[in-house]
């Protein structure tokens, strides 16, 4: 996130979910002075509420190394059915459609944080993609 904030100072990251790495994440946010840019550990949210967060986002990032059923990623951009604008998705193969009809995001290397950051920056710096 520090790389993204350097490029886009007003960027904000909302983290949905919690887990065993939460204390480490909170410490990193504090150590890097990113409290105004990161809202960590918003606990588990019901599906309807998660969809509202997704719909409000410009970019949704799913750096999972494995998605057996694509459960965490709304792959077919369900916002079209509810009249919401579609965010861009960044994820591993099988979680997003990176080209052709239905394109809604990019594939990333989940082992490379800089790869993820660069795609986020690329999307946020291209207003035409966000429209």
Image (cartoon, rainbow, N blue to C red):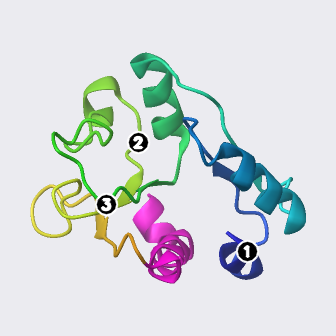
Mark 3 secondary-structure assignment: loop
User: Residue 7 location, x and y as percent?
Assistant: 70, 81
Q: Which mark is residue 65?
A: 3
Residue 126, magenta (yes or no):
yes
User: Residue 91 location, x and y as percent?
Assistant: 33, 61
- Left or right of 126? Residue 7 is right
Q: Label 2 neighbourhood size at 10 Å, few (<14), some (14-19), many (20+)?
A: some
Specify start and end residues of the magenta stretch as a single range. 112-131
Q: CA distance from mark 2 to mark 1?
A: 27 Å
Q: CA distance from mark 3 to mark 1?
A: 22 Å
Quick one: label 2 or label 3, which is nearer the N terminus?
3
Quick one: label 3 or label 1, which is nearer the N terminus?
1
* Of marks 3 and 1, the one in the foreground: 3
Q: Label 1 neighbourhood size at 10 Å, few (<14), some (14-19), many (20+)?
A: some
Q: Are marks 2 and 1 in contact (CB under 8 Å)?
A: no
Asked if residue 8 can be seen in this view, the reply is: yes
Quarter of the image with the C terminus is bottom left
* Residue behind mark 2: 85
Q: CA distance from mark 2 to mark 3?
A: 27 Å
* Residue behind mark 1: 2
- 76 lies above or below 27: above
Residue 59, magenta (yes or no):
no
Q: Residue at x 65, y 32 (%)?
A: 42
Q: Residue at x 70, y 62 (%)?
A: 11
């Amino acid at each position: 996130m520090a790389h993204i904030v350097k490029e886009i100072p007003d960027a904000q990251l909302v983290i949905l979910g919690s887990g065993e790495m939460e204390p480490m994440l909170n410490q990193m946010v504090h150590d890097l002075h990113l409290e105004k840019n990161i809202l960590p550990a918003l606990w588990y949210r019901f599906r309807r509420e998660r969809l509202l967060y997704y719909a409000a986002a410009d970019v949704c990032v799913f750096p999972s190394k494995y998605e057996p059923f694509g459960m965490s990623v709304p792959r077919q951009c369900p916002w079209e059915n509810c009249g919401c604008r579609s965010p861009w998705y960044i994820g591993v193969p099988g979680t997003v459609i990176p080209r052709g009809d239905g394109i809604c995001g990019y594939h990333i290397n989940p082992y490379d944080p800089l790869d993820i950051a660069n795609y986020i920056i690329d999307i946020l710096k291209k207003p035409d993609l966000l429209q």
